[in-house]
Image: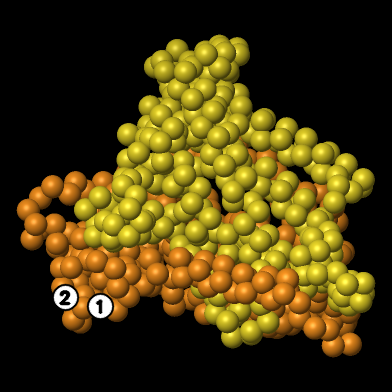
Chain colours: A yellow, B orange
Amino acid sequence: MLKLRWAFTNFGEVPQSQVSYVGLNNFIRLIHSASFMNAFKNTLIISAMKLVFGFPIPIIIALMLNEINARLFKKTVQTIIYFPHFFSWVVIGSIWFLILAPQNSVNSQIATLTGVEPVYWFASKEHIRELLVLTDIWAGAGYAAIVYLAAITSVDPTLYEAAKVDGAGKISQIWHITLASIRPTIVIMLIFELGKILNIFDQVLIMAAPVVYETADVIQTYAYRTGISEMKIGYGMAVSIFKAAIGFTLVLITNRFARKINDEGVF
Amino acid sequence: MPTKQTLEDKTVTTLSFLAMGLFSLSVLLPILYIIQLTFSTSSDASFRILPRGFTLDHYKYVLENELIQRPFLNSLFVTACSVVVSMVLTIGIAYPLSRKELIGRKYLNFIVVLPMLLSLGFLPKYLLVKDLGMLDSYASLIFPAALNTFNILIMRNFLENIPASLVESARIDGCSELKILFKIVLPLSTAALATVGLFYMVGSWNSYLEVILYINEPSMHTLQVVLRTLVMETPMDSSSTEQMLLKNIQYTTIVVALIPIMIVYPFLQKYFVKGVLIGSIKG
């Protein structure tokens, strides 16, 4: 923890003997650095995309699995969709890298089938973010549904009976009973997700090549480059502190917000 | 009371079937496609899920290849050591925290959970490892990542469910504390031990960042690092026969990196649902 003080020094940028305190200089440089601001912006955009598209999908998966009564089918689906959660990002990245490579015949097969020009996702500034979000969903959405599935099983079955007697259809049952009952779980998971948003790292480090850094570089990869590759330890430490401070604030804000929602009830 | 299935109900069920079927296929097909290519003798890489022809040559080639064999063994070694170290440390922390008589339990619990709330990232850890002189050693891959808050919580919550009276009565019978742990508590916790052990195993096998952070020496690199370089940083402009060979090596190395995961997945699946729940409820 004492190392944190290095965030206020020029450690790593001058010879060891000349290291001195530079006050808030590192933080000021940070805010004025175009590449840091770019990484910050990308982090927020990629996180927002993951939240908007990635967050509801596990909930939908859980709701759908709950509607399926065929045990064998359900079990098979679960076995398959939980599986890629245990793959490393290297393996996930490699699988999709090879399938989506321009020379790969599957890629051109898909292109002729759909009539859409194939995109080289991994080298495309415009598409790398979508790729990051999609592979994240591909690998993690199934596993993330477990929590919601468990929450659904604890919903009181008599509620559904009563709703049926009152003539409620499936959709209104799902909306008014299932979703309403698992709302606390959804809110808790949302807080977890928000707490993690600035931590996007491994996936980008592994899957994004320098050609796409303009749109894919995130705070952590930026900290990695400056702190480890260029050995500007003091500056890198300032990046880390900046990240931790914002992350912690986000958690506190959402926590307060969530308490409000859970008390007053939005549904 | 039997109720009639309305059109709406049927639509919802059918849609669910379709959507879940499609999602499963989208997960399964890319994996099967890659796997069949590793057995295929044909150079045609168009989409299919069964290999054209059958050969084990690619595996033989990959596993005998210096560039992959050494990292593969490194990965196995680091993973094996990590699991042992992690389990010893995790039990050592989780067991005391699970016992009500521990003094200052609340504060110790808070300290254990703190890294989950406030994370400064990899840089402070890197500096610590560097100052300890652990760079370029297998120890740097085993110890810094040996504890995982989530796994400690799973273990602690499981151990909390072991009735205190059981421990009490053993103590009255003159059982030593260590004997209580090894003869009573741990044999009752095999499910939790398996879950946490498998989580650590998968985590260590899959780790990438630690290796590129702490290890400069190429001979100590693990399979994940080599796989990434092999697939994502190897230019593809050589002659077509060489390209074929390279492609086959890439596909096969991916599957080799997946084999341990495939082996433990059936066991994992037995336990992880419970693990995820314990962790998320009390996390």
Q: Are marks 2 and 1 in contact (CB under 8 Å)?
A: yes
Q: Which mark is residue B277?
A: none
Residue B36 visible in the snapshot:
yes
Q: Residue at the spot x=86%, y=47% of the render?
A: A266
Local crowd at mark 1 within 10 Å, few (<14), some, or many (≥20)?
some
Q: Residue at the spot x=45%, y=65% of the render?
A: B26
Q: Which mark is residue B51?
A: 1
Q: Find disc 2 in the rendering and name its residue.
A: B41
Nearer the observer, B69 or B29: B29
- Above or below, comparing residue A83 to residue A228 in the picture: below
Nearer the observer, B43 or B178: B43
- Above or below, comparing residue A136 to residue B244 in the picture: above
Q: Residue furthest bottom?
A: B2
**SS of the residue at dot 2?**
loop
**SS of the residue at dot 1?**
loop
- Above or below, comparing residue A142 to residue A26 in the picture: below
